[in-house]
Image (tube, grey):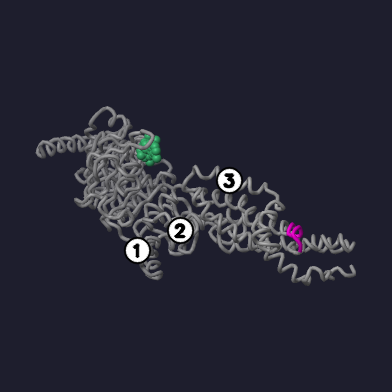
Amino acid sequence: MIRIDSVTKRYPDGTVAVDRLSLEIPDRSITVLVGPSGCGKTTTLRMINRMVEPSEGTILIDGKDSRQQPVNTLRRSMGYVIQNAGLFQHRTIVDNIATVPRMLGWGKEKARARARELMERVGLDGSLAKRYPYQLSGGQQQRVGVARALAADPPVLLMDEPFSAVDPIVRKGLQDELLRIQDELGKTIVFVTHDIDEAVKIGTMVAVMRTGGKLAQYAPPAELLSNPADAFVEDFLGTDRGIRRLSFFPSAGLRLLTTPVVAVDATAEQIAARATAEAPYLLVTDMDGRPLGWSEPGDLTAGGVDPARLLPYGRPFVAGTDSLRAALDCAVLSPTGWAVGVDAEGRVTGVVSQQTIGEAIRGAHAKGRTDAEAAR
Amino acid sequence: MNGFFDIPSDLQHSWLGLIGLHLREALLPVLAGLLVALPLSQLCVRFRWLYPPVLWVTTVLYAIPSLAFFVVLIDYTGQTELTVMIPLTVYTLVILVPAIVDGVRSVPQETLAAATAMGFGPVRRYVQVQLPIAVPAIIAGLRVATVSSISLVSVGALIGNQGALGNLINDANIYNRPELAVNAVVTMAVLAILADGLLVAVRLLLTPWMPSGARARRAPRPEPEVAAR
Ligand SMILES: Nc1ncnc2c1ncn2[C@@H]1O[C@H](COP(=O)(O)OP(=O)(O)OP(=O)(O)O)[C@@H](O)[C@H]1O
Ligand SMILES: [Mg+2]
């Protein structure tokens, strides 16, 4: 465990970048430092590997003062990933990744083999191994940065806005990849970002910092969203934190209706039988059970529909896996106000109305309250 | 063209011998200058305050005429090649020091931070990261220094027989053979062009990592979706 114990950093020009900060960073999880520009996130991160020395306070690594071991030994036990990757432009991709193993005295072949293994782990094609950084896209360079940091299998990974220089779609891919890698490797990751959505998405714990280098709140993301400590945190979380908090409510408990679903080749009797009072619309699926669109029962005729006349069904949610946020989003996207639940293969498992989702949200809130009371 | 390559015997060298001498007197100072400039530049990068005074000193030294150097040096080193090469070495510094300092400073902050974070000490960082990345800037400086040194060797004629091809110009006057002067100038120009071309080739060899027109076409940047999987 990394323990930051009332650490202050005063730069020579008098700037107090970090002010009596205390944080316990749990092992094998992602701790995110988030806050506005200049609030001391980078300074905090760099104090952990002593690229910046604290003015006051101590940083304990597994109970030992980080100043007890030689600084380069400390640094080699921590991978470091930065914005724009900071790759060595004069070395090939494999050699970039193999840097730390080589420094630790591994043979060239062993280090390169390890580098290739890591390329695969971070989702880079082996054909890129002999290229130079300028021949890679920003997203690929960022993956190389992650691979390089992982190369010597350090227990700790420090990441400073690693994904902020790439476009949103690539960023989402990199975030998902990081979560997947973390599932496999279980590193202790300290991740700096100024993007609260990123923090909430990947953090096990989130430390919100405010200008002046003070800690505003340290909590798991769900609690941050439901219980911001003060106006600053609330403001920083943005306007739709209620909606975003739904990401932490599972859709597993949702009661899906299977009646208002008909296949595209349904007979007139089937259509009549499925048009119930419960649902004013019927969802039409193709022969494989994948959704095509919504229709009013009166508009449906036996043996074929005109797809152009169907109402859109939005973006279906994977029932049980996706959160209530995805379910609500789907319901809001469709003019019918109903959401479509599918299985992992995209086949319809049932439909659910906004109203039912609303009840589930109220239920989840009530459960959250009783859980919190029980914890107290 | 009669006697174009007939070198007067007072020069004690054949035409090829003169070329060898000329190259030695021109290139050894560049090499020596590089060996002095490398550590000096690194000091200037590490201690920023040192750079302006160092730059000032190299400029002032460059402003001292070679004749003045010769007058002082001749008491110690005599009428030798060394007396010619010492001022030439000093002159290269005004080109090489800023070239290396700018090259080393052009290494991106992120790259340096990454190196430090990986546990590179200052020496290893200089040798393995800063210097290789500064190679294009250093070679650009070497090209200017080399070409200027090749033309400057001629002043060695001032102290007798140490001007190599430069002495041919002198002899052209003495013996009234203008073709010798043409020979000297053309040969020096060709040497300069060849040396320059050689340095360009070395640069290309040392920096396969630089995006260049030709190379970029051979290894096109992959479409992101192809390789990012
Ligand atoms: N070397 C330095 N000397 C003086 N002041 C510094 C130095 N480095 C950072 N600071 C100051 O310390 C404060 C915190 O800087 P830091 O880089 O830690 O912020 P940050 O939270 O990482 O910001 P950003 O999101 O913009 O990267 C800022 O006010 C900055 O100007
Ligand atoms: Mg920062």
Is A146 left or right of A319, judged from the image as shown? right
Amino acid on which disc 1 is placed:
Leu
Write down the residue under mark 3. B55
Residue sitting at 19 percent across and 50 percent down? A63
Discs 3/2, front: 3
Return the mark for residue A104.
1
Write down the residue under mark 2. B227
Q: Can residue B39 be seen in this view?
A: yes
Main secondary-structure element of the magenta-colored stretch: helix
Could you tell me how far apart the alpha carbons at marks 2 and 1 are, in whole angstroms?
Answer: 30 Å
Q: Is B158 included in the stretch rendered in magenta?
A: yes
Is A246 left or right of B5, judged from the image as shown? left
Stretch in magenta: B155-160
Helix, strand or loop at mark 1: loop
Could you tell me how far apart the alpha carbons at marks 3 and 2 are, in whole angstroms?
Answer: 47 Å
Could you tell me how far apart the alpha carbons at marks 3 and 1 are, in whole angstroms?
Answer: 39 Å
Tell which residue pokes out farthest to the front in this image: B75
Discs 3/1, front: 3
Amino acid on which disc 3 is placed:
Leu
Discs 2/1, front: 1
Q: Can residue A313 be seen in this view?
A: no
